Image: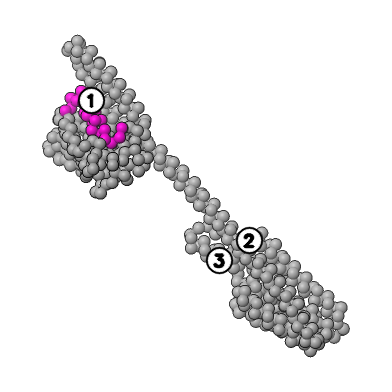
Amino acid sequence: MAVRGPGNAGAAVPAGATVGSANATAGSAVAPPAPAGVLASQRWVFVLTVAFLYAAAVLRSLLAFGDGRRVAALILLAAWLALLLSEPALSRRWRSWFVVEVVLQAAIIGVALTLSDSSDFFAILLAVPSMQAAMRWRVRSTAVLIGLFAVLTGLCLVGQYAPVQSATFAAIYGGTAVFLAAYALTTKRATEARLRNEALAADLRQTNGRLADYAARAERLAGARERQRLARDLHDSVTQTLFSMTLTARSALLLLERSPGQVAGQLDQIDELAHSALHEMELVGAEPPAALPPGGDLSAELERHLSERERQNGLVVALEVEGEAGGDEAGAPLSRAESAALLRIVQEALNNVVKHAGTARATVRLRLRPPCRLEVEDRGRGFDPERAHDSGLGLDGMRERAAEIGWSLTVASSPGAGTRVVAEAPPGRVIAEQTSNEGGRDRDPE
């Protein structure tokens, strides 16, 4: 029997429409509206209920009436069934048809109730439009309709029964309509809830897929960043040591022909440079915050590095430090990450001095008072910054290191006028923010 059940009674799949609109707003996947497998059980319960009630009415008509009234009862039941079966198609063309169908069905049942004093059972069929209304209308509207059906039943039976009996029949059949309508409403809400849960599950699966994709991308990005960090560290430290070893080896080859007695000193220097390269490799493999002691010792680490520069490359670097190393009430000691980054910037800037500046002197200025500042200056041959891209000067690496700690880095240079590399802390820098990720190890003393 092609009767609308809980899945398609009322507006076309109300649950699916509700879920669809909500998920369309969220821009996520929507569960398919009312698939056959989801609503089959509810639909068949409705169909079987209608079939049972209709079969009972037909059987009662065959047993309770004589020939004339039997034919009239069967004709009325056939008309009632025709209205029920045609309702889905007609409602799609005319949205108000359901109201017309309810009125016509009530009229048919009202006529059937007046056939004889044995026709009260026809009132049970009023439960069917009550179920349909429960799945279409609001609860209050459905309650009003059931009340009208009860009044109709009582008025049609009052001519055949006493008022008390008519009221009793009206209450019985009205209670049956309430029970079946409540079941239909519960089924509708359960279906809507199930569809919403399926839509949420689909959204959750889609979200989990996106999170998995984001996690994979983050892992690849972390690997790329780590490779980039290692490449920068190698460029800043080990590359310069190897460069010094190459120059020393060439000097040893020249001395081997001219003054063999001095080769031993060059070989000792190569051995020292090799040990220094191994030490730098160990630092490269460590995490950046562990590469240096707390920021207050950056000046001491710079002094050690500058001494090695002078011994290895003959580069004389003047170190000027402003502010107390440990900081005071106005001081702002550097975090471990800042100290490590600034040391690498100094190393790369001095590498450029050795390789490209054509001078044996430079100056490093470190300011530990707000605003914190690092400056590396030389009076060498200089260069054109606009043409320095991909020239091996490591400018991009120095800018990246400064950006990682929230500092800015500028390079000022021109041919014949030397070079100045300046790294500056952001305005209003607060040391607590800089050390929040280090467990509070480098806080200002109170």
Ranked by sequence position, the earlier of labels 2 and 1 is 2
Q: Is residue 138 above or below residue 384?
A: below
- Residue 300 is one of the magenta-drawn residues: yes
Q: Is residue 446 above or below residue 173?
A: above
Q: Quadrant of residue 225?
A: top left
Mark seen at residue 308: 1
Which segment is the magenta one? 293-316
Residue 404 rendering spot, x and y as whole percentages:
31, 42
Ranked by sequence position, the earlier of labels 1 and 3 is 3
Residue 376 rendering spot, x and y as whole percentages:
19, 36
Q: CA distance from mark 1 to mark 3?
A: 74 Å
Residue 416 rendering spot, x and y as whole percentages:
12, 37
Q: Secondary structure at mark 1?
A: helix
- Residue 396 is one of the magenta-drawn residues: no
Give the foreground label among 2 and 1: 1
x 83%, y 82%: residue = 118
Disc 2, disc 1: CB below 8 Å? Answer: no
Which residue position holds label 3? 18
Say few, some or many: other residues with alpha carbon within 10 Å of mark 3 (under 14 / 14 to 19 / 20 or more): some
